[in-house]
Image: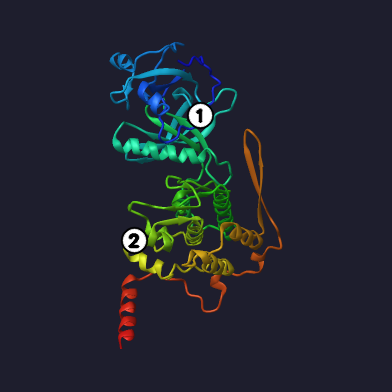
Amino acid sequence: MERDGLKDEVSTKLIPKFDRLIDGDVPAFLVKSAKSFIEEGGTIITARPPIMFQNRYEWMKFEELWRRRYFELDSAGEQQVNLTRAIGLASWEYRAEHVQLDDLIAKFSCGEVRKGKVFKKDSPPLEAAIKTISGRSLEAKEKVRELMAECRLFQELYHPCVVQYYGVCLIAQPNCFIFEYVSHGPLDQFLRANNQTLKRDEMLLMTMSAGWGIEYLHQNSIVHRDIAAKNCLYDRQFVKLAGFARARKTLSYTMKTARKMAVRWMAPETIESFLYTQKSDVYCYGLLIYEIFSAKEPFEGLSNFDAKPFILEGDLNEFPGRTPKKLAEVIKEKMWQTDPEKRANMHQIMLWLQAYSGMELQIVSNANCITATVHQKMDALIGKDVDLNATPNFVEPSPKNPIKKKKEEKRKKKLQEQ
């Protein structure tokens, strides 16, 4: 038996997906079965509510604890299991009394998102967005797994253009996942609400900040896989990437099982072969810029089925008149190529955008916080560019028409057969 004592300062990492952690307050306990301890190196079993032992850490049979109903058994099967050692809460784990839930932001099937605060010793309260998951349904458990996967990625990320992860509270219901609170909420909603009043400089800074965030992910070998305005947040200074449920720490990822997908936000190679790479993120970044300047979704009004042929043939959305001409051209030439090998990478895109916009991000970070400012050169290339509506013969684009496209395809086919 290990007798490590009860150490508040013990630091733990996020448990790998094949392990589980007992949800303890003071303290938590690792649990191992006699069989798996010998053959597999041990397993960790989840138990709720927390087990309280008043500084006791001697061997005790799991079945005895179960009979006494100290907790709800999550997954022990028929194995003989024993408590082996105590561990303290990690720096990213909060006790329930240190999480304050306030105004409701949004609801979903098994939980909510609320504005709130989290409290830590010797630190001021942190304003936070808190996702809560209630109950023990299969849907709730799947959502918890999904959010834990997000947290594993978030824990490694520290950038002003990526939503910051604060931690979790899993020792009581509801389970809480705690993130940075971003004042103006989802970017797509902000764009639609403020479409008529947005200035070009603000839209350009939105473009730049999203790009800085994506470039940072790629520098850390992360493919986001779901870049869209609905998965970004905005605080009137920076766009911050969020929505990491599908993100992967890899350079290339092929989805092995078919699932319902948002085709209108997908690159051609993803539609055809379920392949996600940094180059597919680049393609989707171009779609995000389109959303910023149009305040519309890609192929808005079309179903996934109707949008698919347009995407595969490279017949893409036309930019509205307020889009800078050179920016629209570069997106089409460097980001929306059907062949991913012909697309630029994010570093190349950001080098061009920084020269074009004159905007440079300066970050100062220390152990407690990160601050960022943007400096813009007065002689940037954008000063010599014009918006599309200032070019000769420009007409505001109309929505894509799938019926018209099908008729055109039939006409071409008949001509080929003649």
User: At label 2, which amino acid type do we have?
Assistant: Asn
Farthest residue toward the bottom?
Answer: 418
Query: Is the residue under label 1 in contact with that under label 2 (CB below 8 Å)?
Result: no
Q: Which of the two marks, 2 or 1, is nearer to us in this view?
A: 2
Q: Nearer the viewer, residue 50 or 258?
A: 258
Looking at the image, residue 332 lies above or below residue 101:
below
Please give the name of the residue rendered at 33% of the width and 86% of the height, measured from the top-left corner. 415
Residue 338 position, x and y percent, is 46, 67
Instruction: Using the image, determine if residue 52 lies above or below residue 213.
Output: above
Instruction: Give the percent coordinates (x, y) of residue 117.
Output: 50, 31
Residue type at mark 1? Val
Q: How many marks?
A: 2
- The residue identified by callout 1 is 118
- Asked whether residue 82 is in view, the answer is yes
The quadrant of the picture occupied by the C terminus is: bottom left
Local crowd at mark 2 within 10 Å, few (<14), some, or many (≥20)?
Answer: some
Query: What residue is pinned by disc 2?
Result: 304
Q: Secondary structure at mark 1?
A: strand
Q: Position of residue 58 (x, y in %)?
A: 43, 11
